[in-house]
Amino acid sequence: MTLPTLLSAIRIAFYLRYSCDKQSPTSCEDQLRRCHELARRYGLSTDQVQVFSDDALSATGKDDAKRTEYQRLIAAWEAGQFDVLIVDEWSRLTREGVEHAKMVQRLEDNRRIRLITGNGLDTNLPNWQLVAALFGMVGQQSTRDTQYRVTRGMVGQLERGYMVASAVFGYNLQHEYDGTGRRVGTHWVVNEAQAAIVREIYARREQGQSMHQIARWLNENQVPTSRKARKNSGGYWRPSRVRGLLSNAIYRGEFQWHNSANYQAMAKKKGLDDEVTAYPRPHLRLVSNETWYRCNTGGISRSGYGGGKHALSGLLTCGCCGSTLVLSTQKRCRSLYCAQCTVAKASFDEGERQTVTVATVGVERLLKEALSYFLTTEFIEAFRASLRQKLEGNPQPELEALRKRLRQLETQQERYSRLLAGDTEDEVLEKRYLECRQQVREAKARLQRLEAGIVKLDAQAVEAQLRVDPRGTIEGFFDSELPPERLRAVLARLFPSIVFLGKRGRYNSFFSVEFAAGSAMSLVSETETVDTKTVTLHFRLRYTPDNWMEASQRWSVAMVTAEELAGTVDSPAYRPLSVSRQLMAMACAA
């Protein structure tokens, strides 16, 4: 058989790829032409060539599963369907270290396959492994350089006031060009029609509606989804999409760099710095800070998604382990208990656990009666005096209160961090740590704004709150026919923390209740909260098992002092964990 005949019998494959980093789609045409030139240079016939081509996909590893033609190439390779593989350059195959090593190993294991690249690699030549290693290092470093330059450019655009991402629901993209027609940046502008829907979503969540209820409302009203549908039939709103919308800080006028779920997951996996950088965009604000934070805290629902079917769902925490109390399934006498302590007691026989229950009707009576202890005439007058002080323009008391609150949060965060260092598998503890860390960030940001004079007092809100008396209206919430989710949203605002400390005997339950007077005033006056300070008191809820008494009269509420509470803690009938003692000591000190 002559040499030309042998050369024509050699089976050839071409692999072409262009990446998605603004490379021209015509690149594959150029690569194909270059591969044909290489084949002719080596005397190979290109009458019958298998061509594998991936478009707009990178070779850094993250897109390997999407490179279907590359996967077909490997399958054809393993099936022995070609003898020579020609590519324009090594980086068309891969820029990722692990895949580079696999490719070299394939070439080592099957020497019958010959690889030729346009930039000088030929596996028929000696020491080709060294050349491949150099190409691999150059390709990987080129990827790192590109990532660095892209990140640098994006941060620079953010610093100059531009935006670097696709516009989310509620906004449109607006490009800015210079005098020569070159695009210099992109802005977001408010889409008023979508913005109205966004505000309605926040309003519904603020009133206690679950993500499922909001998603159902959006779908029933045929509101277009916030992202392009993958199918021609169109997409629909899911609870997770509603949650993602509510948690986006841009709606309160702040773009957060490196706060996406994808980046946070990647940073955690690689051990990178996950610090979030905030870039103010006040012209894009759609809701107030108060509304945004209220919709993104655990006060509305324990899971973060739902609304729950009971007004007390997710509002109470355990004084022993700090977990959220759950409702029993007994409909005759619904009660609250700590599932975390109950499981720990049953599974590990831990003696110091809180496994007692408290009836929901008793807790409802407790909260209603607690208002009379908080909303006294003297307390309301003192609160009004603090509002007048704000109106006179003296921010020092609020600054001192905020600095104190920040110190407490930092101490709490440090304690959680130490506990996590000893037991990294505690999901509840990790959740508490992340929540506390977020609260520290928010408190620092508010303190910085207050010190810089950015936070301006809403004089109209102060005047409105000075004119109202919250007692009658607040008490009326308990007697009204509000839906459970709406009443829970109100209770979460009034009582930021309700801790079930335990029982002494069978019929005496003890609680630590934190009350936000500023929220009460804002609810009644229908204005934004001006004063965020809270006050904490401790109560005993007693049940009298007298069948001759009316059900409502069997429950009685009384405030207890720190000394009485300490006696409760040391009672032989109830000995909680040391964590509980720390929580109660902190509450008493506050």
Image: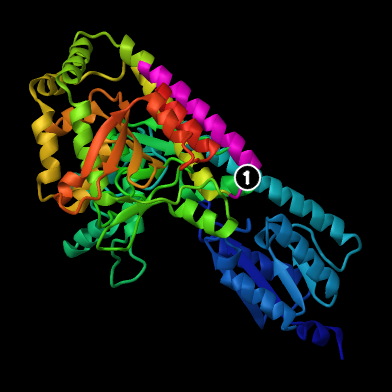
Please tell me whether residue 485 is drawn above or below residue 391 in the rendered image: below
Q: Is residue 206 visible?
A: no
Q: Nearer the viewer, residue 549 or 399?
A: 549
Q: Classify residue 161 by image quadrant.
A: top left
Magenta stretch secondary structure, dominant: helix
Q: Nearer the viewer, residue 381 or 281?
A: 381
Local SS, label 1: loop
Q: Which residue is mark 1?
A: 423
Q: Classify residue 199 by image quadrant.
A: top left
Q: Classify residue 511 by image quadrant.
A: top left
Query: Is 530 on the left-hand or right-hand side of 165?
Result: left
In the rendered image, residue 281, in percent from the top left (x then y), is placed at: 33, 32
In the rendered image, residue 450, in percent from the top left (x then y), is placed at: 34, 17
Q: Which residues are magenta?
A: 401-425
Give the residue type that dot 1 points to.
Answer: Asp
Q: Residue at x 61, y 34 (%)?
A: 418
Q: Is residue 463 visible?
A: yes
Query: Is 573 on the left-hand or right-hand side of 141?
Result: left
Query: Is 501 on the left-hand or right-hand side of 344?
Result: left
Magenta segment includes 421: yes
Q: Quarter of the image for the C terminus: give it.
A: top left
Please tell me whether residue 63 is drawn above or below residue 485 in the rendered image: below
Magenta segment includes 362: no
Please tell me whether residue 499 is drawn above or below residue 378 in the rendered image: below
Q: Assess disc 1: are there few (<14), some (14-19) or many (≥20) residues with their C-alpha within 10 Å of its C-alpha.
A: few
